[in-house]
Each structure stands twice: as structure tokens, then as C-alpha cells.
Image: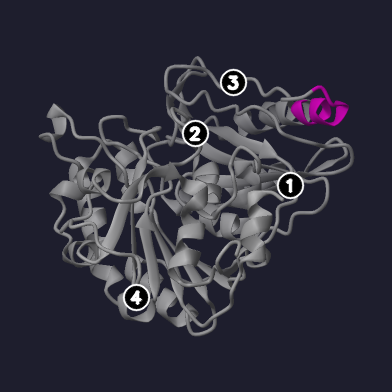
Amino acid sequence: MNVDEVYKSLLVPNNSKLALVVLDGLGDIATESTGFRTPLEAARTPNLDALAKRSTLGRMIPVAPGITPGSGPGHLGLFGYDPLEFEVGRGVIEALGLGIDLKQGDVAARANFCSLDAKGIVTDRRAGRIDTRICEAQCVLLAGKIKKIGDIEVIIKAGKGHRFVVVFRGKGLEGPLNDSDPHREGLPIAVVKPQNKSAKAAKMAKVIAAFYKQALPLLKNCKPANGFLLRGIAHQPKIPLFEDRYGLKAAAIAIYPMYKGLAQLVGMKKVEGVSTVQQEFDAAVDALKAYDFVFVHVKGTDMYGEDGNFDAKVKAIEEADAALSVLLPEVDVLAITGDHSTPVPVKGHSWHPQPVMICGEIAGWDGQDRFTERTANAGSLGVFPAKYLIRYLQANARRLDKFGA
């Protein structure tokens, strides 16, 4: 019997309410450039401080020591799925989040509009974070001109800011393929190649090459977003549903499509219509009337970490702390963490374990009065794989029976 089967055999239903609040990219590092403080340490967080005084703390490894995760693996780990076992392309997640009904054999790619110089070198991978309206207009331009590549249908849909999705639909396609995103400025768009030797993946690579050949000339006069990068090019995998694994009826609240897509992939109900952090937490309160578990995703902490903007990341943490207050009376067990660290000095995701705090009647108290990376280092949870977080929440909610006699 594997460990997941053991957990499933121990499930005990009750009326407890659980919440997972993810401040994306929350973890950070203290360096001289930041005054030897992290944004969590610099932020004014009265609600998080009060929670810390009745919580256990620790840090989590999102995938494995030294591995820097993308948002997909980071969240799958938080949902209790080993990211090394359940590999999901970012394009699939984004497409689901945007409400695209993926069909068997579809291959989806998450795309970023970017800036290219005259030689085709990427000068800004996010095109200055263009406004969503510009993204929508350019997606309309591409979709109006490119409807098919040979016998393959092309579906293009705008997301938030500089992000959009491309879905390729037709016979004989398969992923995964490597990204066309070089993952840093100063390099050209990478050639997309299959990650296996299948004929379907080889066909998909040729389709993408043809798509670029048609699309880039259409964007040449679009400034600053005159190019695009593809990431997470893959087909939809089979994955066990969240409620089947944990006995929890779950809802998800997020503003950005990717995170709604991740939740939908594991069977959570997407709550639509929110556009601010406060609306997210208000929606979580409403969702808990009908659901056992709610996942709330806050994006700003990650975005400002990637920008290297210390002060803005501090403000994003403070905004989440203030909005959090409405949720606190409604839950029996609450976890607050990130899906990974996005340190300001790194300006990107990193491998550093992210801080985590679990609050509940029987969670205990670690003697800390703040929730920061340093206090998390002293917590009784220690450093553990993120895939076990949901199991800790189940145990604290008394939803796991005793194992053995």
C-alpha cells in the first residue's frame, strides 16, 4: 500500500472548514541590498502577527532541494500532488483558467507578448507588462489572420496583462515541447523542439514553427509588444481529483487565469468575477457556505518580486494582510504560505524553501509573534516537502483517523 492509499483509508468526514491562502512567491532572502530584511519582515502585518501567536510555523520545499519550480509545479505541490509525478504543462493550466474547453489531443501553450530588437533579440520578456487591452487587441489581430496551420486549428485567447493562450487542435498532435522563451533577455526566441521522439510531438514542433513564421510579421509594427514567447507547450494529462483524494469539496478564488486553471485541473470549483484582493477574500467567505475547502491566490507578491521591487512587495503583503481579516472567523484550519519563493534580489522564482504557517485549534503554538522567514525557521514544522501540506491540514481538522491498532 502506498502512502496516498494509507491516507485515503484514514479519511474521516466532518463539518470542519479549511482554507489555503497562497501569497504567490512569498518567500524572500535577506541581503545587504534589502537592509538584511525580507519584505515579510518589513511589512506591517497585524493579522498575520496575531495568527502567528497561535500557529505552528515551518518552511516547505516546493519540488526537491535546489530545484526552482514554475507556478504549476509549485501549486500542484501545495494541492498535495508530487510535482515530479504529476507533470502539467503551463499552457494547459492557462487554457483551462481562461475557460477553453480542451479536447482530447489538443496542445496548449501559455504565451507572453515580448519586445524584440531589429535583430530578433528579446529585450523585454514581458513587453513592459502591457495593459490587458493591448493584449486583447493584438490577440484579435493574430486570431483574425491565423485560423489554421495546414489541417490544424489555431485558437488564440487573451489573458491578463501581457499573457495569452494558444491552443492547437487537430489530429496527430502531442506534447511536451521545450519553451520558445529563452528565460532571460539578450537572447533570440528559442527554437521549439519535442521533449520525446514521438512523431506527434515532431509534427507539433513543425506547426509551431509555421505559426511563428506567420505571426511575427503581423506584430512587427506593434510596439512594445512586437513578439511573443511560448511556454509549457503540452497536452492535458490525467490527474486524480482533489475531492477523491482528500474528501474535501473545494472552491478556488483567483484573479489570474493560470491559477484558476490549476484549480480546475484537480476538480476545484472556480469562483469567477473577482478583480481585487479584498473581493477574493470576500468571495472565499461566501464559498465556505457550500464548500469544505477554499484556495485563495494572491498574485502581487510574486509579480513585484520578479520586478525586484522591494517596497511594492511589502505593500502587496500588507494589502493581503488587511483583506485576510474577513476570512479568519469562518475557518477551523488555515494555512498561509507561498507556492515558491520569488526573492527581490533574484528577480525571479528560486529554490529557497517558502515560509508556511498553520493555524487551528490543535495546531499548537511555536512561541513566535510574527510570520517571517526567520520565525518560520524556528518553527516546529521544520522543513518539509510541500506535497504534505494538505495532509497537515487534514490532520489539524481531525479528518484523519488513527493508523493501526
Residue 213 appearing in the image = yes
Residue marked by disc 1: 237
What SS does tag 4 mark?
A: loop
Earlier residue among tags 3 and 2: 2
What amino acid does circle 1 point to?
A: Pro
Depth check, mark 2 against mark 1: the one in front is 2
- Give the residue number, with chain letter if any, for mark 4: 327
Q: Secondary structure at mark 2?
A: loop
Q: Is residue 168 left or right of residue 395?
A: right
Numbered mark located on residue 64 in the image: 2
Residue 135 placement (x, y as % from top left) = 50, 48
Q: Tell me the quarter of the picture where residue 103 sits.
A: bottom right
How far apart are the alpha carbons under marks 3 and 2? 27 Å
Residue at screen point 23% across, 40% down: 309
Q: Are marks 4 and 3 in contact (CB under 8 Å)?
A: no
Instruction: Name the quadrant of the C terminus.
Output: bottom right
Q: Earlier in the sequence, mark 2 or mark 1?
A: 2
Kind of element beneath mark 1: loop
Label 4 and label 1: CA atoms lie apart by: 33 Å
Q: Which is more toward the observer, 355 or 5? A: 5
The location of residue 117, given as percent across then percent down, is 45, 20
Q: Name the residue at 13% across, 28% down.
A: 32
Q: Considering depth in this image, is 118 or 100 the residue closer to the camera?
A: 100
Circle on res. 190: 3
Q: Is residue 376 magenta?
A: no
Write the start and end of the magenta stretch as one range. Answer: 197-205
Question: Mark 1 or mark 4, which is nearer the start of the sequence?
Answer: 1
Query: Cβ–Cβ below 8 Å for labels 3 and 1?
Result: no
Q: Is 182 left, or right, of 147 in this rendering?
A: left
